[in-house]
Amino acid sequence: MNRVPLVPSLLAAAVLASQPAMAGYTFQEGDLSGEVNLTAGGAAIFTRNVNFGAGRIDTRNGQATGNNADWQEVYVKPAVSFSYALNPDFDLLAKGSIVAASTFGDGDAGGFTRGTDNRVSAEEAYVGFRAGEWRFTAGRQDYMIGSGFIVMDGNLDFHDDAAFWLAPRTAFRDSAVLGWSRDALSVQAFSLRTDDHLGDYRMNGVNLDYAVEGVATFGAMAMKLKSEDRDSNIATPRDGMEVYNIRALNAKLPGLQDLTLNAEYAVQGGKDGGIKYDAKAWYAGAEYAFSDLPLQPKLGYRYAYFSGDEDLADNKREAWDALSKGFVDWGTWLVGDVVGNYLLNNSNQKVHTWSLKTQVHPALTVGAMHHQFSLDEKNLFGAPVSDRRFADESVVFVDWAATPQLFTSLSYNWVQPKAAAKQLLGDKTFSAVEMYFTYRY
């Protein structure tokens, strides 16, 4: 989900739609100040041998629509934010934005949208205040914890939301965030509600981050889930789930400044009625920048684990629930652009990821990634398989920052099925050509 990247590591320094925008039109009248921004994006995707040749299935009517899917997506997102200073230590805050999105062509390869889907709706709409080291906001708003491993995207962009691949809608609805920060320490208490397609559940919790300069940013999170609409959670129960997470991000070792380490560990526990949760997920990764070599290539490796459920018929939920994970850059946390979008969803899987990228020009990045997917338990969404190896996905990409406002990307992804995928789906290579742009004002 969400092709609009967060950090400059990939897609040539583009900026995620949900983070504070590049400066647009700013204004100030006395104690009132504000900013008007506009984000627009478009994509054209061409896929072949969808689901390894099993074909595309429309999720709304269950009909097969062929082995190939070609579609286009566009969106625009105007936004305006305000700040009113009552005194030097107290500001009133407000922000609003609207997303208009459309899908054309065949609809996405997962069958989540059709070529006739389009929608205009409110995205962000919150008010709040800043009082010294405190900040409070309530309403529809974006919120991200750590690397987006568990909490980041409150909307799945399914059906008439349109633009599933671009995923411009990320705000949590009916939410509130109270934060306090001083120097290296920041703490937030949050209450976030997801959209109906994510299950319409609420996450209540606390998050803590502590940045040690030159060492790492350490964090911890604890939250409990409550279903707002039990009918929407029949297939994926979440009432009473408790989630705990610890992490160390952007870690550096003494004398090895070219090496960056990242790791997180999380568990899902708790119970509600006759259902008990017992799942876990973790990852560890390293990236080394060869700063003394021409073009300064970066080589990376990451292992990610998401637990599976051996027996889906009992009342114990051992498969990791991806919840409201987000997209930050290639492979994080949409693991494999084809596999992550249309086949697996950060559950019941083990993934080895290798990456190599380099900036051949300050505005041009080229790179490649390779993912090896295996199942944790020998079943695919409950259907038994005889082998855990699922698929290998590779991608080559070119990212170009044409101007400070315009970012473009072109990629070719191909996924080779292994024993588990061949047993249940097909034996053809599932491929995708993806072209993308975003404009920020």
Image (cartoon, helix red, strand yellow):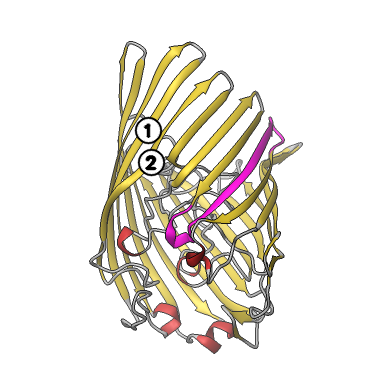
Inspect the image, locate mark 2, and give the three-letter code of the amino acid beneath it. Answer: Glu
Are there few (<14), some (14-19), or many (20+) residues within 10 Å of tag 1? Answer: many
Place of residue 116 in the rendered image (x, y in percent of width and height, measured from the top left): 23, 66
Q: Amino acid at mark 1?
A: Lys
The disc label shown at residue 261, or none: none
- In this view of the protein, can residue 417 be seen by the observer? yes
CA gap between label 2 and label 1 equals: 7 Å
At 69% from the left and 58% from the top, the residue drawn is: 282
Nearer the observer, 10 or 100: 100
Which dot marks residue 95? Answer: 1
Counting residues from the start of the chain, the first of labels 2 and 1 encountered is 1
Q: Secondary structure at mark 2?
A: strand
Query: Left or right: where does residue 375 sit relative to residue 215?
Result: left
Q: Quadrant of the N terminus?
A: bottom left
Whether pointer 2 and pointer 1 mark residues with C-beta atoms closer than 8 Å, the reply is yes
Name the residue nearer the viewer: 71 or 94.
Answer: 94
Q: Which residue is mark 2?
A: 124
- The residue drawn where x is 33% and y is 39% is 97
Q: Residue furthest right?
A: 254
Residue at 43% x, 59% y: name it: 196
Q: Which residues are magenta?
A: 194-217
Query: From this viewpoint, is residue 40 visible?
Result: no
Residue 214 percent across, percent down from the top left: 69, 32
Looking at the image, is 259 positioned above or below residue 70? Answer: above
- Which of the 4 image quarters holds residue 387? bottom right
- Specify whether 435 is left or right of 320: left
**Residue 332 in the figure: left or right of residue 53:** right
Query: How far across and down, in percent of the image, does residue 112 sit?
Result: 37, 68
Residue 435 vertical position relative to residue 38 in the rendered view, above or below: below
Quadrant that contains the C terminus = top left
